[in-house]
Every structure is written in C-alpha cells, then in structure tokens.
Image (cartoon, rainbow, N blue to C red):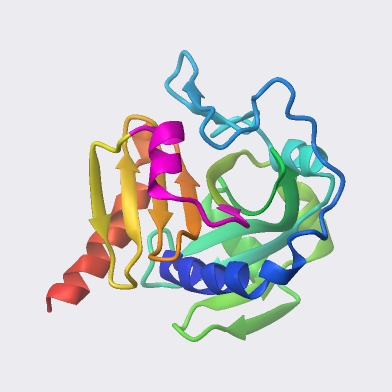
Amino acid sequence: MDRRIIFTVLFAAIVGGAGFWMLLPDEIDDSNGARLPWSTSLDAQGRLQVFGFTIGVTPLAEVQEAFGEPGKLTLFANEEAEPPLTVEAFFDQVYLDRLRAAFVVTLDAEQEELARMYERGLRISRLGNGTRKVTLAPADKESLRQMPIAHITYLPMAQLSIELLESRFGVPPNWVTDSKGVTHWLYPDKGMDLGRDAHGNIVIQYVNPSDYERVLAPLRADLAKTDE
C-alpha cells in the first residue's frame, strides 16, 4: 500500500480516535522490556529485532498470537509501485507499554504467489490513487500466517514531544520533511524511520537495515514531486 496513504489516513485516525484512548484491550506483558518501540537490536545476521519479533524471520502467526487478534489481512496491487503486489495485516487495538497502538505488518511473500492470490481474490475495490485493494480467500489468509514479516509500521495513540523522542530513540543521524509536513527521523543502521507531524503524532517504520531502501524510496519520490 502507498506509504503516503498510510501516513495520511492513519494520522487522521489517530487524531479522530482520541476520545477512545481509554477503550483498551487486555494489556500485553512488557515486563522484560522486549516490546517497547525503542527497544531494538540486531541479531548475528544483522536482522532487526523489535517488539519481540525478528524482521524476516517471525511468521505472521506469531504476531497474531502475541497481539491476541488475527488482524485484517489485505492484498494491495499497484503496477507503478515497487513491488507491485504487497500483503499487509492491520491491527488497530494493540496495547503495549500502557499505550494503545495500531500496527501495519507487511509480509515477505513472493510476487508470483501474491499474483495467484490476487486471481483468487473475493472482491476488488479501488483506492483514490489507483491502488487496488483485494479481499483474500480464506485459504490464502491461512497460508499467509506462515509468511515472515518484512516491515512493521507502528502508530502509537499518543502525541509525543521531540524531547521525549530524543531521550528514547536518540538524535537521528539524518532527517527530512515530506510534502505532508511530516518530519522523518532516519536511523538507517537501526532500520527505523520515525515520522512526526507538527502536532506530535507519530508513525514509526521498522525494516532490516539491509532493506532500508524500502523506507527511502517513497521519500525520494515524494521529494522529487515537491521539487517539480
């Protein structure tokens, strides 16, 4: 799914849903600190570990079990995007470290396999930017549970100050402001992109450092359009 749509729609959802912050599901045990958004590490192969998951290794089934819900699985198709087919699981009510957060988890699946799932899709609708949103067949949803995660987008339902972010995540080595006014704090060695708008709303993307181009490419495209 187009990352600009995720930022625009989910920032609006965070602000619009502020009155529901107290409607929280059962808390997940964070006593070991492994599920805090700033608690990250790399394994021996250089893969990012965050929220108790390992990017490129942990299957969706383990994420669903940890969050206590299946999430909403959707396939997105856009010939102009790279890759043209992506599948994501959206979790809108996860409670970590006393914060309600939404998660978008992108899976690491082969394009050929996703193309077959597209053909078996039960319903196709079109988003504003031309991206097609596909409702997956139940059997395909089940098989996707064994796919490893490739990308996590974390959206805490709280407005956080720059001072707090710097104390938790550290000062970024680089940052850039996109056309929507979101400032992206870039941590390529950690595989993180922390986006903050002028109101303090936060979106954090996590990928393996070796796959950081997944984060940078949409930003470059956005900035190129701004310069035109």
- Write the residue at 82% across / 54% down: 24
In the rendered structure, does residue 115 fall within the stretch colored magenta?
no
Q: Position of residue 13 (x, y in %)?
A: 61, 72
Residue 92: where, in percent of width, then height? Answer: 71, 60
Q: Position of residue 113 (x, y in %)?
A: 60, 54
Q: Position of residue 78 (x, y in %)?
A: 46, 72
- Report if residue 106 is visible in the image: yes
Name the residue rendered at 46%, 33% in the picture.
168
Name which quarter of the figure residue 30 lies in: top right
Q: In the picture, which quadrant includes the C terminus?
A: bottom left
- Residue sitting at the far top: 44
Residue reaching furthest right? 26
Asked if 2 appears above or below 64 in the picture, the reply is below
| Magenta residues, start to end | 155-170
Q: Residue at x 68, y 71 (%)?
A: 17
User: Residue 103 versus residue 22: which sits nearer the camera?
Assistant: 22
Relative to 124, 31 lies left or right: right
Q: Is residue 195 above or below residue 147?
A: below
Q: Nearer the viewer, residue 158 or 136?
A: 158
* Image mark count: 0
Q: Is residue 81 above or below residue 175?
A: below
Quadrant of the image occupied by residue 195: bottom left
Q: Is residue 91 left or right of residue 211?
A: right
Relative horizontal placement of residue 77, taking residue 75 as reference (left or right): left
Residue at image coords 78%, 37%: 66
The reply to whether residue 120 is visible in this rendering is: no
